[in-house]
Image (spheres, grey):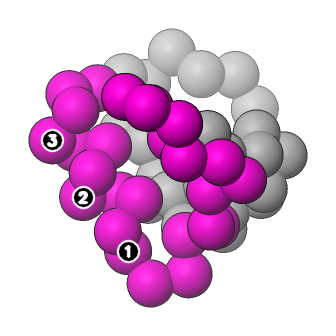
Amino acid sequence: MSRQRVLQITRRPGFPEPVARLIGTTVWDADEVDAWAATNRPPRPTDGDEQS
């Protein structure tokens, strides 16, 4: 994922707030980001090989 895409996603309303802003990087709580992604990520395309 590109830096530009990360910036787009992290600026969306409802995205978790960072837990720290350090020189050169921003830190988020992984559990909060995972929970956000579980409810906000669009369905991934499939290639037909997935098993039910």
With respect to residue 37, does 12 lie above or below? below
Q: Residue type at mark 1: give it.
A: Arg
Q: Are marks 2 and 3 in contact (CB under 8 Å)?
A: yes
Question: What residue did someone put label 1 on?
Answer: 12
Query: In 3D space, how far apart are the residues under numbered discs 2 and 3 (Cα atoms)?
Result: 6 Å
Q: Over which residues does the magenta segment extend?
A: 1-26
Tag 2's secondary structure?
Answer: helix
Q: Is residue 41 visible?
A: yes
Looking at the image, the residue that sits furthest to the right is 31
Circle count:
3
Q: Position of residue 30 (x, y in %)?
A: 76, 39
Give the quarter of the image for residue 24.
top left
Residue 10 image-quadrant placement: bottom left
Q: Which residue bears the numbered disc 2? A: 8
Vertical side of 12 occupied by 44: above or below: above
Query: How packed is label 3: few (under 14 Cα within 10 Å), some, or many (20 or more)?
Result: few
